[in-house]
Image (cartoon, rainbow, N blue to C red):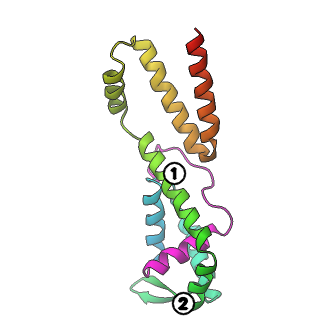
Amino acid sequence: MAGGEMRVGRMLAQGDLKLIALALIGEQPRHGYDIIKVLEEKTAGWYAPSPGVVYPTLTFLEEVGFLTSQPEGAKKLYVITPEGSAHLADNRAIADAVLDRLAAFGARASMMRQPESDVTDRANDANSELPPLLHAALINLRDVAGKRLAANPDAEAELVAILARAAGELRKA
């Protein structure tokens, strides 16, 4: 994770990384570093599991017979076994749901990362008649809502309700 970015809470539930690693290695043989990079890309850079979590997970999966590894220089290349494929097939829905959740989080995170100048330009085009202080308040509201959603992806409905109440209050004013 790059410096200055906010740290996201626990992204994966217990056991999720095992299934994700199996799913990714089931697509193609991979190194541990590849798994870290794929997850970082899926979340638009907001989450990358540490090597201290990934490599013990891969070792465990190898010990239970779901993966094999072969040396490739200083690295190990992991390949899924028939037992690993069967376990993944039994748990495919969970693996896909977790990968989809991470991708959705990444999409929301990418939207939040748009440079403020882009947001300002769009807001200026759409609301050219707004006073500068109101315009700044709307940008602040968007940023706060985006950060809250990044910290808790399940808060979307709550945020929508809060914004709907605010709009209702503005209609009354």
Q: Residue furthest top?
A: 173
Q: In the image shown, does 76 or 108 lie closer to the viewer? A: 108
> Magenta residues, as a range?
1-30
Q: Which residue does the numbered mark 1 point to in the structure image?
A: 105
Vertical placement of 130 versus 54: above or below?
above
User: Mark 2 falls on what kind of element?
Assistant: loop
Q: Which residue does the numbered mark 2 point to in the structure image?
A: 81
Q: Residue furthest right?
A: 14
Residue found 46% across the figure and 90% down from its top: 70
Query: What amino acid is labelled 2 in the image?
Result: Thr
Q: Is residue 56 left or right of residue 121?
A: right
Vertical placement of 155 versus 64: above or below?
above
Quadrant holding the C terminus: top right
Vertical placement of 73 versus 54: above or below?
below
Residue 85: where, in percent of width, then height? Answer: 56, 85
Classified by dominant secondary structure, the portion drawn in magenta counts as loop
- Dot 2 or dot 1: first in sequence order is 2
Determine which of the numbered discs, if any, sits on residue 56 in the image.
Answer: none
CA neighbours of label 2 inside 10 A, class few (<14), some (14 to 19), many (20+)? some
Query: What amino acid is labelled 1 in the image?
Result: Phe
Residue 136: where, in percent of width, then height? Answer: 44, 19
User: Mark 1 falls on what kind of element?
Assistant: helix
Residue 19: where, in percent of width, then height? Answer: 59, 73
Q: Indicate whether residue 28 is drawn in magenta.
A: yes
Task: Determine which quarter of the picture holds residue 147.
Answer: top right
